[in-house]
Image (cartoon, helix red, strand yellow):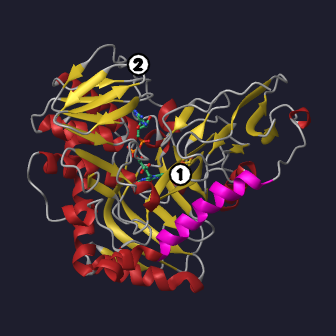
Amino acid sequence: MREESFWLTSTPATAYPALTGDVTADVIVIGGGIAGLSTAWELTEAGRRVALVEAGRIAAGVTGHTTAKLSVLHTLIYDRVRRSSGPEAARQYATSQQQAVERVAEVAARLAVDCELERVPSFTYAESPGSLGPVRAEAEAAAEAGLPASFVTGTGLPFPVAGAVRVENQAQFHPRKYLLALAADLTRRGGQIFEHTRATGLVDGDPCRVTTEGGHTLTAANVVIATHYPIFDRGLLFARLEPRRELVVAAPIPAALDPGGVYITPDQNTRSVRTAPYADGQRLLIVTGEHFTPGAADVTVRWQRLIDWTHERYPGAEVAYRWATQDNSTTDQVPFIGPFHAGTRRVFVAAGFGGWGMSSGVLSGQLLSALLTGIAPPWASLYDPRRLHLLREAGPLLKLQAKTAAHLVGDRLRPSPVESVDDLTPGSGAVVRVRGRQCAAYRDRAGELHAVSARCTHLGCIVSFNDAETTWDCPCHGSRFATDGTVIHGPAVRPLQREEI
Ligand SMILES: Cc1cc2nc3c(=O)[nH]c(=O)nc-3n(C[C@H](O)[C@H](O)[C@H](O)COP(=O)(O)OP(=O)(O)OC[C@H]3O[C@@H](n4cnc5c(N)ncnc54)[C@H](O)[C@@H]3O)c2cc1C
Ligand code: FES
């Protein structure tokens, strides 16, 4: 089994240069995932000079580890939006998301990109009759929102379901094949992409200035923060964003078993199914699920549960790849796309896609490009990050804050599973108190000890060891670090401090 994303292994690595001097542009985009690349491309299309900086390689963050269903059916969203914000908001959500799906098809055709775009129906299903209520309500709300949606009892899955919402004319694609073509097109038209260039500072002024880890400065009238979890978060969006990590396995199956659609159920801690083109006579079955707060223990056990489910539902399927990634949900389940906070006219953000950033990432590009060029579509206020519906969001907001506070305080007091670093076996890690300080200590397979501070450099929560991925993960806002302290995933921008033990 390869412990890497199929999307990354089936496309060439990119090699855009790192920033080696100061740069001036019309717009600086920070982050080269689907949101950042779509925004940079749409702005280039609108005639703006764009410079994009990416801390690692483009389309290799969450976007490189997604499952890439391109669908407007976001599990159970329409009934929720209808109840919380009214039928017009649900209609705007449906229209804007469908336009994003169509945008991918249109751009892929225009650039002649073979991104394996396949038109398929999208399903949210329930296996047990007890879970049918929300599915029926979703079918009705999605149809009322103007989508070609219906309630069905038959699907292409190889096991019976009690019922499902079915929405026609959705899609699945290869996200990197699409985005690498977008990147090539935007640089061909004068846009600039700098990889291995981490943004570490922002001055929101006239003009704006972004500074990088390498000590260089980018200057522009506008900045778009598309770093997945927002950095430079003066709007305190972190208080309204909940990170959720999820596991993915992929197994070749005979093409005859292709379920002919994209599927998801919120039951059983979420199960999501799609397939992708693979070898002759085969499709690659991609199954996602087992979500958890980053930093939770027993990731290995969760992975085994997902593999067991895949074997049970598709007997004979041998898992060939496994990988993991995470996404953030907002407290009202609608993404944050628009001005970063009430005090800015120049800095914009795209975040909080709640597991549906393929369509919402493309939508971010369309919406931010429209806002920056002075035309606001009717749904701009639906996605505006400055919205705060206290009455509607109070419950989830308080729950999220209580959870974060419990980690911030409780994790400092939690006893270590080992008495001292001497008890760490090869390949294991734990937070250990050394001379009164909490150290994140890991013993590698060769027996060597690596120790860094366990205090997350974002807001100081205590990181936990992820046994399946050999990383230190922060439960508060989802930052992740390598065992030498290097940042793998934000919002942290600084590494964990090295500790001498
Ligand atoms: C398991 C799983 C399956 C999913 N499947 C689907 C699906 O089927 N359909 C769907 O619609 N959505 C899906 N999603 C959601 C979707 O993948 C994400 O919402 C989307 O990829 C997020 O894109 P992004 O551009 O915001 O983030 P990313 O792709 O992570 O891009 C952000 C980039 O910013 C860079 N960055 C961070 N900090 C800095 C910095 N300081 N300076 C410079 N660069 C920086 C990062 O390196 C990264 O490359 C799934 C999510 C998960 C967890
Ligand atoms: S990610 Fe916010 S404190 Fe760690």
> What crowding class fits label 2: few (fewer than 14 Cα within 10 Å), some (14-19), or many (20 or more)?
some
For residue 255, side relative to residue 226 (left or right): right
Magenta region, main secondary structure? helix
Could you say where residue 374 lies in the image, as x and y percent from the top left? 8, 50
Residue sitting at the far front: 436
The magenta segment is 395-414
Q: Badge 1 is on which residue?
A: 477
Choose the circle earlier in sequence order: 2 or 1. 2
For the point 29% across and 66% down, which residue is it?
387
Q: Is residue 397 magenta?
A: yes
Could you say where residue 261 lies in the image, as x and y percent from the top left? 43, 60
What amino acid does circle 2 point to?
A: Gly
Q: Is residue 361 magenta?
A: no
For residue 56, side relative to residue 294 (left or right): left
In front: 36, or 211?
211
In front: 415, or 329?
415
Q: Is mark 1 within 8 Å of ligand 2?
A: yes
Could you say where residue 188 lies in the image, as x and y percent from the top left? 19, 22
Q: Which mark is residue 214?
A: 2
In front: 117, or 299?
299
Could you say where residue 432 lies in the image, as x and y percent from the top left? 80, 40
Label 2 – label 1 distance at C-alpha:
25 Å
Residue 133, compared with residue 103, is above or below; it is below
> What crowding class fits label 1: few (fewer than 14 Cα within 10 Å), some (14-19), or many (20 or more)?
many
